[in-house]
Amino acid sequence: MLAWYVRSPTWALWLFFVPMLYAFYRTCLQPAYFVWAFRARRLLREYPWQVYKNPECGIGRIPEAGPADVWLKFPDPERTAEIGIVMRSHLRATFWVRRLGPGVKPAKASQVEEVWFAGDPRFAGVIAVPGPRRLYVICQCLSCKGISAGAQGAGPQAVERACRAGVRVEGPSPMAPGAVEN
């Protein structure tokens, strides 16, 4: 195919320009999808799905979120409070932004009345709506080293479980030798 491409007339080159450009784009983009898929897989192996009807959500309006960031609140597993977890602006987040923002039509907002969450909102998790698509890995904060989270109010078992799920926790790991238990 490449030999034919090189020997073809100039006008025929333009027929293959767009498909080749798209192939180069996908080649650069695909490794990020594999990383995302393996991260979601590790989280789903450790945490079961939980179904939430109409969780509190929005765009902006909480201190951790930027003006265009979507956030959802899920209950803290060890307390009665709710924890806001921010979905940073990303290409995969467009589905959620179009359904959780202010002024959304009721037909679109009804598509996210039921949200599935697998994870610990203090660290990371996977959110989805019913159906085979719209999985999204969501985490508390991002650092240059990958997912990291401060374990504010999390017990040692919760931190250990998050580490097994692939979350990198700031500070000493509870599984490390010499770690001190409270």
Image: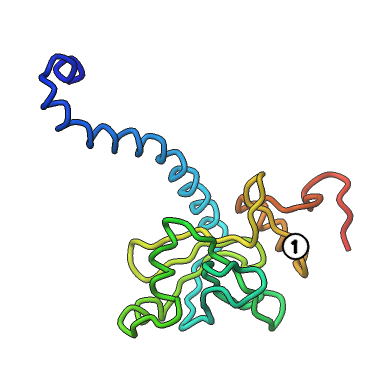
Would residue 155 appear left or right of 59 to someone viewing this image?
A: right
Residue pointed to by mark 1: 151
Q: Quadrant of residue 109?
A: bottom left
Residue 119 percent coordinates (x, y) = 57, 64
Residue 46 percent coordinates (x, y) = 57, 58
Residue 142 percent coordinates (x, y) = 63, 54
Q: Nearer the viewer, residue 3 or 182?
A: 3
Q: Nearer the viewer, residue 58 or 39?
A: 58
* Mark 1, secondary structure of its residue: loop
At x 70% / y 58%, what residue is drawn?
149
Would residue 172 appear left or right of 7 to someone viewing this image?
A: right
At x 66% / y 44%, what residue is drawn?
145
Amino acid found under the numbered disc labelled 1? Ala
Would residue 118 appear left or right of 179 to someone viewing this image?
A: left
Q: Quadrant of residue 72?
A: bottom right
Would residue 13 appear left or right of 175 to someone viewing this image?
A: left
Residue 33 percent coordinates (x, y) = 43, 45
Which image quarter holds the N terminus? top left
